[in-house]
Image (spheres, rainbow, N blue to C red):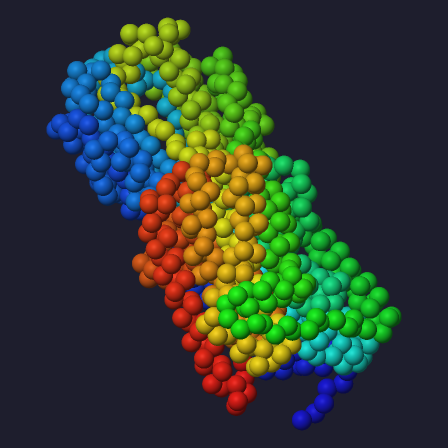
Amino acid sequence: MTRLRPGLLAVAAREVRWIFRGPVARFLLFGVPVIAFAVLGFTFSHAVVRGLDVVAVDMDNSATSRVFIQAIAAAPGITVAERANDLGAAASAIRAGRAIAAIYLPPEFGKDVLAGRAPRPVAFTNTQFFTPGNNAAKSIRDAMSAANAAVAPARQAVGDRAEAGLVPEEYVLSNPALNYAQFLLRAVLPTVLHVVIAISAGYAVGSEFRRRSMRAWWDLSGHSIAAALFGKLLPYYVVLMLMFVLMVGILDVWLGVSFRGSAVLTAVSATLLIVAYQMIGCLMQLLARNMAFGLSLTGIIVSPAFGYAGVGFPVLAMQSFPRAWGAILPLRWYIQILFDQASRGAALRFTAEPFAVLSGLTVVLALLVWLRFRSLARRGLIVPEEAEPPLDAAAPGAAGAFAAEWRRAISDRGVFGLFVLAPVLYAVFYPQPYLGQIVRNIPIAVVDQDGSELGRALTQALQAHGNISVALRASSYREAEEAIFARRAFAIMGIPPDTEKNVLKGVTARLPIYADSTYFILFNRSLQGMLETVQAYAADALAHGARTEGASVQAATRLSQPVELIQVPLFNPTASYSSYVVPAAFVLILHQTLLMGAAMLGGVAFERGGHVARRARASAAAILGQGLAHWTLYVPAMLLYFVVMPRVYGFSTLGSVWALAALSIPFILATSFLGQALGLLFRHRETAVLLVLATSLPQFFLVGVSWPAEALPGFLHRARELLPSVNAINGMVRINQMGASLTEVRPDWVRLCALTLLYFVIAAALAHLRAARASSHAPAV
């Protein structure tokens, strides 16, 4: 075989051999993205949320009330899963998770409808679970409107006059079907890849410090920094570009999500994204010169990036720090380019700014890596010696393993960082993008072609609404549309010619509303603001200056709307995004840091003491003792996340600390035993960090926080129950944010106990198998 001359190709060939000889590198590059794409593809395969459970409290039980209950049961998004005798039972069902909402029909409901007294049924929706709660609220509202139409008496002339006036007409831009897959999955898939990009590059460079040879790498490059870096990263770039192609296939072919813009610009942007995050992974390793520590630094940057990119919570509602931090993350600008081109089909000039910023960040990061590498090369690429503390022999029994695990966790820098420092850092860093809580003053454009007093008054009313702000009074729809492409507006209100004349003549005047659904929160809030403004203005016009509670106004309203639905949001009444996402994310952070730390300790033991050290920590008593040590180590983190930080950030804390503690015991033990089982499979401490970081985002969507569990396919819904974080999030959020009792979350507690037993048995069984094979030194993963 011909030996390649030193240079880029020689370094690339060396890296290809390393990838195909190392199972971890192969799985990270090929396995993790494909598995994550498959999981997320199935997760969002049901683009419309259906089958949300609702409790019905019918205190009237008349023929009319049954019509309304049947209308709710027939609504496509919800189903009446339970009937309760009072609101207390309905509230318990919501706290326990058996329902997402309740509909209450008061006594004498049917008589009041027939007598025209406009009874007020109440819909209670659990907005602590944001997406399913809002979907249930909309489905109940639509069902009640349908039932209203079914039972309303024949419209009389006054009713017809009540309908005349201003009528808003909604038109959805960019994503007219309101497809969640088009919105979320288009952003989530590249976010998964950006994590894999950074940690795979960090793994490639970090492996040179201890596993391979910095000197051999440098010599093979011909002492060229460019050849050393680009030769090493080229194989990873090729594979990751293929993953971007696979991503396009999943969206366009499998899920049928249309692409509307420039494929060339999007492909060039994907190249910039790959290079930028490869540079981040390299830079963290070159700064730390320790693989595990460098990977941890990389994880701190890439793991919360989804929030800082402005996908879940819009950038315009963020405070100063998350805006600034997000602006230096390449993902933020790539997502903007992707949405502009793929979803909106915007002209290239509207994407010039984010493309220029992404290009600039890539150049700056490459320059920083080059400067750091040059500094290390001038010092002889010396790898610092790491003084490893001796591996203490544990005393026999669970108590000895408990004490030994405490010493290992405190003495090892990487494990200490995961168990102690990471929870503190994430408690401050992770919630920052969401602390704006409520999106206000969304810029909109108004196209007033009427030029009347009505148009000016309506524009002032729009400006006064808290959700929206009139940023542009456009002379044409073309000008307003360009403002949307330029992100100077996110919706358009049109006031056609002769609007005021038609209103004065008693003819219906239709107001077109064009709302951009590229970002769902901006879409929902801006649309809500415009609809409420038009409805309030129309009601004022109907009153003709009379008091809205006056008899004439109420009579007209009742003819067109015999039942007035009252909607009451529960547990998160302000619809705060941070109150919804952060408490659940805190539980997931505890799960992931403990999982990485427990598995890392297994790798540390093997690195320092081989099979002998692994057997010493793998007996049943040792596994139990180590799990109890992990629980005590995590008591401060749990107090920080469930007691201190909710009060700092202003989240509700309705539950009992003792109920939380009771649920935390099986949660922490199940996670610890799972981590210990993984630690028996790994030879190196950083393997756990690699795999858990790479799979963190799919876990986030599987646990039912950002995407409702009701929308998951059946097999995925069952499989996710194997994650301790799923039942822990469900139970702990219900206890702390909703005031549920331990009895109400008993199913979650039971499942966590079952997982504790399952993973303890698996860890003990793996320990037995490893001990049986130790004499033959079978290769570990």
**Going 67% across and 64% down the picture, which residue do you hit?**
411
Residue 682 shows in the view? yes
Lateral position of residue 345 relative to residue 172, left or right: right
Q: Quadrant of residue 390?
A: bottom right
Q: Quadrant of residue 108?
A: top left
**Going 30% across and 27% down the picture, which residue do you hit?**
122
Q: Give x and y (percent) for residue 360.
A: 73, 53
- Along the viewing direction, whichever of 25 and 630 lies nearer the viewer: 630
Residue 459 shows in the view? no
Vertical placement of 631 versus 71: above or below?
below
Lateral position of residue 475 relative to residue 749, left or right: right
The total of numbered circles placed on residues is: 0
Vertical placement of 626 versus 779: above or below?
above
The residue at the far left in this view is: 63
Q: Give x and y (percent) for residue 474.
A: 56, 27
Q: Give x and y (percent) for residue 773.
A: 49, 86
Lateral position of residue 645 relative to residue 144, left or right: right
* Quadrant for the N terminus in the image: bottom right
- Along the viewing direction, whichever of 254 and 646 lies nearer the viewer: 646
Vertical placement of 137 versus 466: above or below?
below
- Along the viewing direction, whichever of 492 and 3 lies nearer the viewer: 3
- Along the viewing direction, whichever of 186 and 407 lies nearer the viewer: 407
Q: Quadrant of residue 509?
A: top left
Lateral position of residue 290 relative to residue 459, left or right: right
**Going 12% across and 28% down the picture, which residue do you hit?**
63
**Going 44% across and 61% down the picture, which residue do you hit?**
670
The residue at the far right in this view is: 378
Q: Give x and y (percent) for residue 440.
A: 54, 30
